[in-house]
Amino acid sequence: MKVNWTAFAVFAAILIGGLIVWLGRVDDPDALIGPPAPRSGAPAPEFSLVDLNGDTHTLADYRGQPVIINFWATWCPPCRAEMPDLQQVYEKYEDDGLVILAINQSESPNTVEDFADEYNLTFTIMIDNFQVSDTYEVMAYPSTYFIDRAGRIQHAEFSGPMSKSFIESQVLDLLD
Amino acid sequence: MYRHLNIGPAVVETALILYLLGFYISGEVARRHAKRHGLDGNAVQNALIIGLLVGIIGARLAYIFQHWAIYREDLGGWISLTPQALAIPAGLLAGTAASLGYAYWRKLALRPFLESIAPGLGLFMVILGLALLARGGAFGQASDLPWAIDLWGETRHPTQLYASIGGALTLGAWWYWRLSLLGRGFAFIVAGNALTWLLVGLLLAEPELVLNTYRTLQVVAWAALVAATLGWAWWSQLPYQPGNLSQTE
């Protein structure tokens, strides 16, 4: 009997490929989430910082609300460029529970306050001494994390400036 | 993980540089290789460049249409440089269609065209693994093997390197058997890489699932493997004739 090797190869690809997919099935998707880490899909690492008014903010306080964490500095041109857009999006979705935690990198409170006044920023601004930015493995400014109501990072953006539309599209995904 | 590179005052994503480098090298390899298949190398390279450009534009337009309510009021956002504002699957489809459409328009016969780009595709898949490693994508499950890498708070299987190694082995096998694979090289490269990602998928920790159970990457790799095997079977029955459409018709 002549063996049709071509048909055999196709049949083997379907069967063996399907078997490997079946072996790789995930019965408990939550088991893949892993420990807190600064990557999409993982729980956002916890932190506590003091804002410009002296109030302490812990990330866990905002569980149940969509949160944007933005690492920035006044000397960083793309950070400056995207701040007005962040403010506009914040004003639009503040009533929906949107929280923006803008974490400045180790600049003086006066410098940061002057900047916030100049740009009329009303969201929460905190100053970090590189501890939180190290936890989030921030290597460039701005770096932005979009965190859903469950405290998981839905998207991490390491380039800037982000456009207003892009910020808003990510916020709408968080609000869904 | 080396997510960023400092080039002068600019900070650039390492993966982006690797993608562009991989595309450039692949295009050059395809251009040189096209002559062996009786095609104009520049036309083949142009088809790839057009595919890239249309792919990027298509990916952005698809992202805009997905978020139309927002973007219709912000035309500046359409052309913003935010690289994440892209719908990648739509971009891949648009880019592939544009490449093939341009190749058809230039009368590049499909089979020699695919044969021309096969080694470049193989090289790109090797570089893709390195780019994923740089950005921490397609990461593996926790492991205490001696070669495990520290990534996202745990030591993990270096799945990206496994994929690169699989891609390199596929490319090496193609090179070794390239004469007997003539006319089926593209199917071989696709099948080898699809099999690689099917197996690598067993060790992935990324929670991208189909039907909340099956790993998306594995399902895509399975479809690619079946398509490549069907292509192999089809082309095995047909004699291979290099050259463009006017020569082959």
Image (spheres, helix red, strand yellow):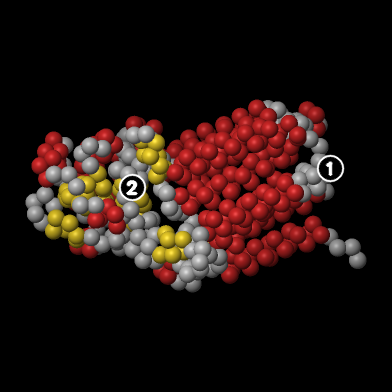
Report whether B40 appears left or right of B124.
Answer: right
The residue under label 2 is A139
Q: Quadrant of residue B95?
A: top right
Single out the residue that lies furthest toward the right. Answer: A1
On the image, the x and y values in percent for residue B152 come to 39, 60
Please state if B19 lies on the left or on the right of B233 as rendered: left
User: Label 1 to label 2, Cα distance in Å?
Assistant: 54 Å
At label 1, which amino acid type do we have?
Pro
Q: Chain of mark 1?
A: B
**Percent position of residue B130, x then y:** 52, 49
Which amino acid, by three-letter code, is at mark 2? Met
Secondary structure at numbered mark 2: loop
Q: Which residue is mark 1?
A: B239
Quick check: B74 left or right of B146?
A: left
Please name which of the two marks, 1 or 2, marks the residue nearer to the observer.
2
Name the residue rendered at 73%, 31% in the picture.
Answer: B35
Q: How many marks?
A: 2
Q: Is residue A94 above or below residue B102?
A: below
Quadrant location of the N terminus of chain A in the rendered image: bottom right
Foreground pick, A51 / A139: A139
